[in-house]
Image (cartoon, rainbow, N blue to C red):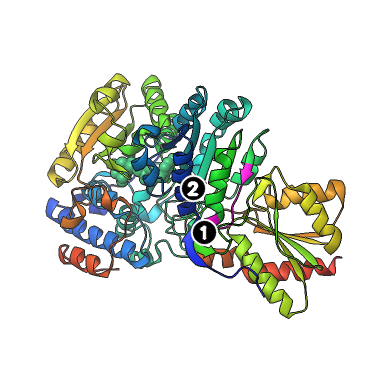
Amino acid sequence: MNPFPKLDEKDTRSGFGAGLLEAGQRDPNVVALCADLTGSLKMDAFAKAFPDRFVQVGVAEANMMGIAAGLTIGGKVPFTGTFANFSTGRVYDQIRQSIAYAGKNVKICASHAGLTLGEDGATHQILEDIGLMRMLPGMSVVVPADFNQTRQATLAIAVHEGPVYLRFGRPKWPVFIPADMPFEIGKAQVLVRGTDVSIFACGHLVWRALQAAEALQAEGVRAEVINVHTIKPLDVAAVLDSVQRTGCAVTCEEHNRHGGLGDAIAQVLACHRPTPQEYVAVDDVFGESGTPDQLLRKYGLDTPDIVAAVQRVLKRK
Amino acid sequence: MSAPNAAPSKASRASTDDLARTCSQVRRDIIRMVHAVQSGHPGGSLGCTEFMVALYFKVLRHDPAHWSMDGAGQDLFFLSNGHISPVWYSVLARSGYFPVKELATFRRLDSRLQGHPTTHEGLPGVRMASGSLGQGLSVAIGAAMAKRLNGDPHLVYSLHGDGELQEGQVWEAAMSAAAHKVDNLIATVDWNGRQIDGDVDQVMPLGDLPAKWRAFGWDVLEMNGNDLVDVLRGLDDARSRTGRGRPVAILMRTEMGQGVDFMTGSHHWHGVAPNDEQAARALAQLPETLGDY
Ligand SMILES: Cc1ncc(C[n+]2csc(CCOP(=O)(O)OP(=O)(O)O)c2C)c(N)n1
Ligand SMILES: [Mg+2]
């Protein structure tokens, strides 16, 4: 049985919008910037509540990153909002020099990440952003699993000192993390205890991992499901603790198999405890237009793909 | 290397009335494509219909049946504001680049008609991926430079959103085109005054746009993009100004959503699909002139 029943269906970006408004209410230094996507990022409530602390920069993401970096000089806590592609690849050097290297307290908040963006297609479906951001020294990378957790994560990064990349998505998605479940940056969450395999997942695929664990239980496989909502800094202790008990790992992410959660975990395993691992990730290709469910199926990120990856890894134990 | 001259396309003898009929059909295609998948960008597509029809059915020296990536001996077109793909796909299909019935695959899985234009699936007529705004002018400049290096006298056209002009790269490109005297390039701006979050003047004003382009060294003209006669005049004027040492910019006044009464007057229809009732109301305003796909 999945101990985390579906409570509701909501988009994670709305969790960001709710969290941003609350963060703004708690701390007058919180400011927000957006590049002509206020509605898409659900930043309208913040913009309405705090018009003086909201900066519309137009379609100019590079400028947005630079202004955000400048706002930190003077104690502001800037949250930038645009799609994940335009939050990372588009502005990589602005982030690298003016935010990461300069050590500025900017919160880069990125919606419409991954394939589940859907019909807009590959130009907008970035599958490389986790990799890009986790390569930057000092950058934290947070990928929450549902609406409630995205709200919590937004509040958490507001009081965290240092640059953060917060990644979330567009579609309505199951809400299953209880609103009062404790959230701590860098602390992975064991959602289901198991003995046979560790399934590490982030973002939208945590729900799919829970479904896979349920399906596997019917086959007599006891899967452990770990929500790795923080990819950097990675909860190394939690990863090692789990694989020490299960002896094998499957990683699930809405990202290219290169550079994302799977690679972060593989690095830990290779260095500390060599363990068989299988990836559920996009196989080094660009996406395309389609509905979120169609795309997850076509690109091998669906529940049956996780089940199949578990079956493969079990044979390698 | 000498480039062959493209035969003027057959459609280039089209009358203004023919073009107006084509516009009506293209607008139907836009509404039907976006409605069918409940996603996509009707507003800018409808506003740029006269321009795209005039370009593809009258002005461009191109040969859809012999499309090639390099486009030697033909005029080239780049859509920098890739979100208005519906209007481009419609004029490409209806001018013979690919079967009209393929419009039914727009934004669906396994289609060549991706949400934003791409070369990835090999759709004839498309030479560059676009969708991430602000990159197309640089590409058009490069293609125009290549034509010059190849001794090919044909022109390069491009289209850009006005909100898109807020991207800094556009101005890097503008500066470089003038510096390198790229005078075989005609860049048009869809000057509709709207973008996603509202009016351009509210979101991030562009200031004196003609003066900005002039200050960047361009030969600038203006036209009414929703008046076919003025579009034909403007494109003709623009062509006559090429080859004189300066890149040419057309600032084209349009109305977002033009042709469907309830889609005009605001930024609302930038990227919203009509529901069944709205689609029916829109189509009732647009005579089917060439046969729906
Ligand atoms: C680099 C980049 N940033 C943001 C977006 C999201 N976006 C798509 S269209 C658009 C507004 C563009 O306005 P304009 O160029 O005036 O087009 P119009 O709304 O008139 O069709 C934005 C912000 C994008 N596609 N690319
Ligand atoms: Mg516009």
Q: Which residues are magenta?
A: A141-148
Chain under numbered label 1: A
Image spot of residue B133 (x, y percent): 41, 40
Helix or strand or loop: what does disc 1 sit on?
helix
Report the residue marked by disc 1. A116
Image spot of residue A262 (x, y percent): 71, 53
Among the two numbered marks 2 and 1 on one chain, the one whose residue lies closer to the N terminus: 2
B202 or B49, which lies in front? Answer: B202
The kind of residue on which mark 1 rests is Thr
Image spot of residue A5 (x, y percent): 59, 70
Q: Is residue B174 above or below residue B162?
A: above
Q: Residue at x 61, y 57 (%)?
A: A181
Report the residue marked by disc 2. A19
Chain under numbered label 2: A
Is residue B111 visible to the viewer in this orientation of the structure? Answer: yes
Q: Residue at x 51, y 63 (%)?
A: A173
Image spot of residue B81 (x, y percent): 36, 43
Q: Is residue A95 magenta?
A: no
Which quadrant holds the N terminus of chain A?
bottom right
Q: Quadrant of residue A243?
A: bottom right
The 10 Å Cα crowd at callout 1, few under 14, some 14 to 19, many 20 or more, is many
Observer-side mark, 2 or 1, equals: 2
A210 or B253, which lies in front? Answer: A210
Q: Is residue A2 left or right of residue A8?
A: right
The kind of residue on which mark 2 rests is Gly
Q: Is residue B293 left or right of residue A66?
A: left
